[in-house]
Amino acid sequence: MQDSNASTSFTAPNPNSKIGHILLVNDPISEANAYYEQQNPQNYRLFCAEELNIETSRAIIDESYIASEGTKTILIAANSFNIYAQNALLKVLEEPPSGIVFILYARMKSLLLPTIRSRLPILKHITKQKLPHFALEIRTLNLENIYLFLKEKQKEIQSTTLKAEIQSLYLDAIKSGLHFDSKETQIFERAILWEEQHEKPHNILLVLLLLILRKKKQTFVSQNHFIS
């Protein structure tokens, strides 16, 4: 896990693909809306959802079979994608109606099934920004402020910033003088996967904050032993 400066990477699409592409962006819903507003609404359709569900997929399929003059582009944007909803879209992606182009907006390609990714080329337009500090100060971290922080966090059903919070927490801990072994570092890496699997944010952060608190105590004992 590393800090990052502002940068944008780009993966060239397959020129033989005529059915559309996947666009990886920082904020799928807002960027899809901004793009849609610049287009002719007669030739574009927009489907946005916090989580793409089966009902939305069926509406997308229905729209793809409605005839229109010229090419019709269907924009699909979501922060997460239900597996059943993706499976429902597979057939129309395999055999799209004539004159239909699909653009899928997503934050990470890992949110999409391999079968979806294999049918559409991927364009990566993600701008990496310097991470802010975590909400809690690592040097003064204790059970009381962990409890109060997670009590507020528990009110969040879903967080769109959790991945950044996990990365910030890790970096702040390193900068405060804590050193993690490979197994401990892997816990932070797995925490990002838990986020993708829709685990509750406060549960994920509880595991990481208790890990850091334990590491702080170990470091304190080690330093005192060295001084004595």
Image: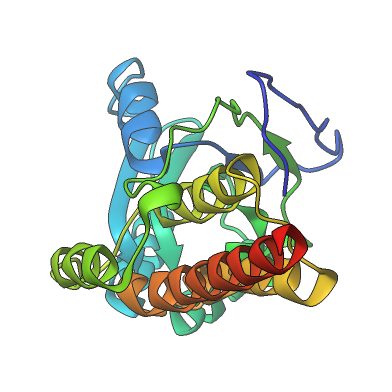
Colour convention of the picture: rainbow
- Nearer-the-camera pick, 149 or 98: 149
29 with respect to 12 (left or right): left
The relative height of residue 99 versus residue 7 in the rendered view (above or below) is below
The image quadrant where one finds the C terminus is: bottom right
Q: Which residue is painted at 41% across and 69% down in the image?
A: 205
Res 89 visible: no
Classify residue 222 by image quadrant: bottom right
Can residue 127 be seen here?
Answer: yes
Residue at 15% of width from left, 72% of height from top?
151
From the top left corner, tell me how far across and down residue 127 is, in percent. Answer: 59, 25
| Count of marks placed on residues | 0
State whether residue 12 is above or below residue 80: above
Residue at 35% from the left image edge and 70% from the top image edge? 201
* Left or right, 210 with reference to 120: left
The location of residue 225, given as percent across then percent down, is 71, 69
Picture layout, residue 60 above or below residue 5: below
Q: Position of residue 157 (x, y in %)?
A: 21, 71
Please tell me which residue lies in front, 175 or 195. 175
Q: Residue furthest front?
A: 228
Image point 55% across, 25% down: which residue? Answer: 129
Pick whichever, 194 or 118, lies toward us: 194
Where does the image place residue 167, in percent across and percent down from the top left?
A: 56, 49
